[in-house]
Image: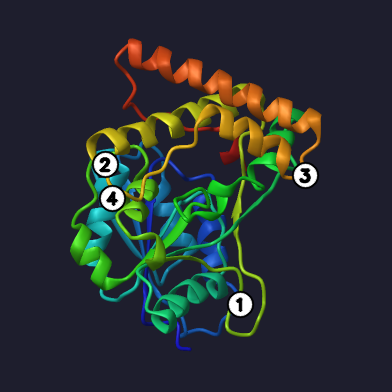
Amino acid sequence: MSTDNFSVIIPAHNEANVISRCLNAVYSGKPSGDYPEVIVVANGCSDDTAQVARNAAPLATILELKRSSKTSAMNAGRERASYFPQVFLDADVECSLAALGALCEALREEKGHAASLPAQFDLSRASWPVRAYYRVWIRQPYAKRVLGGSGCFAISKEALEEIGPFPEVIADDFWALSRVADDQRMLVTKDSNGNSVVSYVTPPSSMLEQIQVEARRRLGSDQIRQQFPNQQLVQASGSSLVKSAFANGSSPWDATAFLGMKFASLLLSRWRKLRGNEHSWVRDESSRQK
């Protein structure tokens, strides 16, 4: 399959430390001239994200927006993009060209409308509670429902035209993928040659940072459910979460750490709601260290 007939859109806000590794992964493993269209949208940056991206990927298109908004950056990338499907890739995530191509090939061959990759977590810098959290997380049913979590997803032309522009939401991937019916979403685990494909994600290093990120995820999904409800959105109850944490081969220690951090993130999200800042963006900086 030729890889020059899909577009990769990378929104980037103050990502100078990580944008090179993201772009290096995209451009790795293929001869010159066999690349997709890559568009980096630096938005509201106070660092040199745009210049670092230009240096790392001279073939990429680099856009600069004054306003800091991930979804506005994604919309700007969509307007500039020439090809479909379109892949939306977080700047702090690493996906090989083979993995990105597998997403788009799966959409074409199976005529689906949305595709995502399984996440492989780099836990080398993570504390014990964070490692325990993700050992349980990857076993959860929602980790396979293709509703976000890997920092990379592809959408078909038909689906993009139907869902329209991305609104101002925290959970952009959750919003986009939840606009597509379950039977039109797919989790792509192998390429056409049978090789495994993944998205490499670096989680927070500390328990406190993981709780903050999880609170943001919770607030983001709550925002989608309240403002953009549809039948694709199914929320697990507290009892089902406890059951699944202990029923999928997780150790009692890992499950306890997982549930404890989930509960702490629930309390933090409620506190942020009480203070009226539930829609402000919170991100982890520990995963963005060089």
**Horizontal placement of 72 versus 200: left or right?**
left
**Between disc 1 and disc 4, whose residue precedes?**
1
Q: Amino acid at mark 4?
A: Ala
Residue 212 locus on image (x, y percent)? 52, 25
Report the Cα–Cα distance between label 1 and label 4.
27 Å
From the viewer's side, name the closer residue of 124 and 169.
169
Q: Which residue is mark 1?
A: 29
Instruction: Give above or below for 225 relative to 256.
Output: below
Q: Label 3 amino acid? A: Gly
Which residue in the structure is indicated by mark 2?
A: 229
Label 2 or label 1, whichever lies nearer to me, is 2
Amino acid type of the residue tagged 1 in the rendering: Gly
Q: How far is the residue under mark 4 from the one under mark 3?
A: 40 Å
SS for dot 2: loop
Q: How is the image coloured?
A: rainbow
Amino acid at circle 2 = Pro
Q: Marks 2/3: CA distance?
A: 33 Å
Q: Residue at x 61, y 40 (%)?
A: 203
Q: Choose the circle earlier in sequence order: 1 or 3.
A: 1
Using the image, tell me which numbered label, if any, was put on residue 73: 4
